[in-house]
Amino acid sequence: MIPESFIQELINRVDIIDVIDKSVPLKKAGANYSACCPFHNEKSPSFTVSPSKQFYHCFGCGAHGTAIGFLMEYQGLSFVEAVQELAKIAGMIVPQETRDIDKPQQKVIPGMQEALQTALNYYRAELKKSPQAIEYLKGRGLSGQVAANFQMGYAPAGWQNLQSVFPQYESDVLETIGLVVKNEQGKRYDRFRDRVMFPIRNIKGECIGFGGRVLGDDKPKYLNSPETPVFSKGRELYGLFEARSALRDQ
């Protein structure tokens, strides 16, 4: 657990006005600041932020809280993620949580996020080149706009297609994030082949993994990225990033 003393110090160190103003432009209103509430539709401002109390409150929908609460509600972050985000702004280091010493922890390797984004861009470009994959999606009722909104792509048939965008195909990063598989003989090959690709994005919109669906009847029909340092299946909900605006409106 993150010590309560650290959380309190963090709230005292950051300025809630600066935090909120980056997402919701605020206007000075006496001793406080105001804006139209970002959590419900309104024409006249009822959202107030107090610099002295470091607190926000909406008189329309009742939303209220600290800078941590704002990041959680506005960006859909978890409590820990919101604390980490604010800590970066304040230049503070979040105390390490107590971990289960019996459970091995995967180490985050630099370049993972960039590699996943590179793969996403590659798969999206390949979808435009594959009439078969496009026809498959149309046959399932998915329009080009839907495919674009969800950044869908296509992994072409072949064993080492990713080598064309990853010159360092032998890099441990590709194997760790599940893009490349190594067989018993030590030969490496692409995990996803001849599949429609669904990028799995976290609440921040970052690609953290993929789901792939075969076009024909090969097995397995669906293939997902394995557990990695940036992707934990039990902690993610597919489509949550895309649904944030609708969820906020509701």
Image: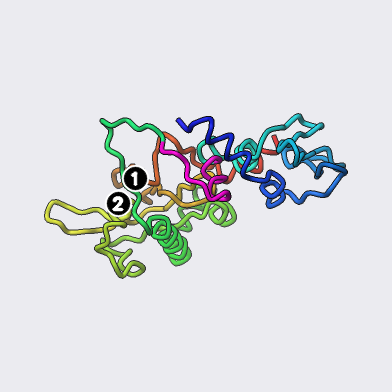
Drawn side of residue 188 relative to residue 67, left or right: left
In which image quadrant can residue 133 be found?
bottom left
Q: Which residue is rendered at x = 86% and y = 45% of the image? A: 29
131, 239: nearer the viewer: 239
Element under disc 2: helix
- Image height of 158 relative to 100, above or below: below
Name the residue type under label 2: Thr
- Is 171 inside the magenta-drawn segment? no
Mark 2 Cα-neighbour bin, 10 Å: few <14, some 14–19, many ≥20 = many
Residues at discs 1 and 2 in contact (Cβ within 8 Å):
yes
* Residue highlighted by disc 2: 176
Q: Which residue is rendered at x = 32% and y = 30% of the image? A: 100
**Residue 195 visible from this viewpoint:** yes
Q: Which residue is rendered at x = 46% and y = 47% of the image? A: 200
Q: Position of residue 43 (x, y in %)?
A: 86, 43
The overriding secondary structure of the stretch rendered in magenta is helix
Element under disc 1: loop
- Is 86 inside the magenta-drawn segment? yes
Drawn side of residue 170 relative to residue 233, left or right: left
**Residue 247 visible from this viewpoint:** no
* Residue highlighted by disc 1: 228
Name the residue type under label 1: Thr
Q: Which residue is rendered at x = 75% and y = 39% of the image? A: 52
Q: How is the image coloured?
A: rainbow
150, 216: nearer the viewer: 150
Real-space CA distance between mark 1 and mark 2, rounded to the nearest whole angstrom: 7 Å
Q: Position of residue 225 (x, y in %)?
A: 35, 46
The span shown in magenta is 82-96
Q: Position of residue 118 (x, y in %)?
A: 42, 62
Q: From the image, which quarter does the N terminus lie in?
A: top left
